Image: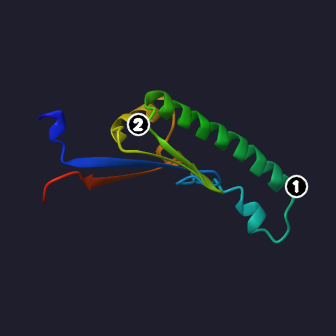
Amino acid sequence: MKANNITCVQIVRFFFNFFEKREWSPGEQAPLDNIVKADKVMPEAVRELNSFLTERLDRIATMMELLLDAHSNWAITGKKDKIIMETNSFDFNDALKLLKENGFNDDEFILKVEYERKWGML
């Protein structure tokens, strides 16, 4: 197949949520719940959230560094509760492989892949 004969563009989006993982393991609880859903907020809950966020934000930064080292054409957007990395020029399989090889799990990010028709008719 010729490189210029591509009919679809792959749009890859990684969502790195600050406060939540995609899936919590059995026995794990979102530390923010102990603050926003508690009748009385205890100092231990604030310390648990601090510990969680410190580790979580460090892991997000490491994932971002890995993806940026592998490919420079990312649109990166910061939101109040997440970082979004988006590209249409890096295959999501390569990105997933890179993250997995470096010890990251599927529950640490949300990956959305869309395909946009480049030319022609279906």
Point 49% across, 27% down: residue = 69
Please, what is the three-letter code of the amino acid marked with disc 2? Ala
Looking at the picture, how far across and down is residue 29, in whole percent? 66, 57
**Which mark is nearer the camera, 1 or 2?**
2
Residue position marked by numbered label 1 in the rendering: 43
Seen from the viewer's position, the closer of residues 107 and 17 is 17
User: SS for tag 2?
Assistant: helix
Quadrant (top left/top right/bottom left/bottom right) for the C terminus: bottom left
At 78% from the left and 68% from the top, the residue drawn is: 38
Q: Is residue 59 left or right of residue 2?
A: right
Amino acid type, label 1 = Pro
Residue furthest right as drawn: 43
Residue placed at 46% from the left, 35% from the top?
Answer: 99
* Residue located beneath label 2 in the image: 95
Percent coordinates x, y for residue 113 in the rendering: 36, 51
- Disc sitting over residue 121 in the figure: none
Q: Residues within 10 Å of mark 2 (few under 14, many from 20)?
A: some
Counting labels gives: 2
Residue pictured at 77% horizontal, 49% vertical: 48
Instruction: In this rendered view, identify the residue nearer to me: 77 or 55.
Output: 77
Task: Note whether 69 is above or below 57 in the view shown.
Answer: above
Compute the Cα span from label 1 to label 2. Answer: 39 Å
- The picture places residue 55, in percent across and down from the top left corner, at 68, 40
Label whose residue precedes the other's in the sequence (1 or 2): 1
Residue 6 place in picture, x, y as percent: 18, 43
**What is the secondary structure assignment of the residue under circle 1?**
helix
**Where does the N terminus fall, quadrant-wise?**
top left
Judge by depth and name the residue closer to the eye, 15 or 79. Answer: 79
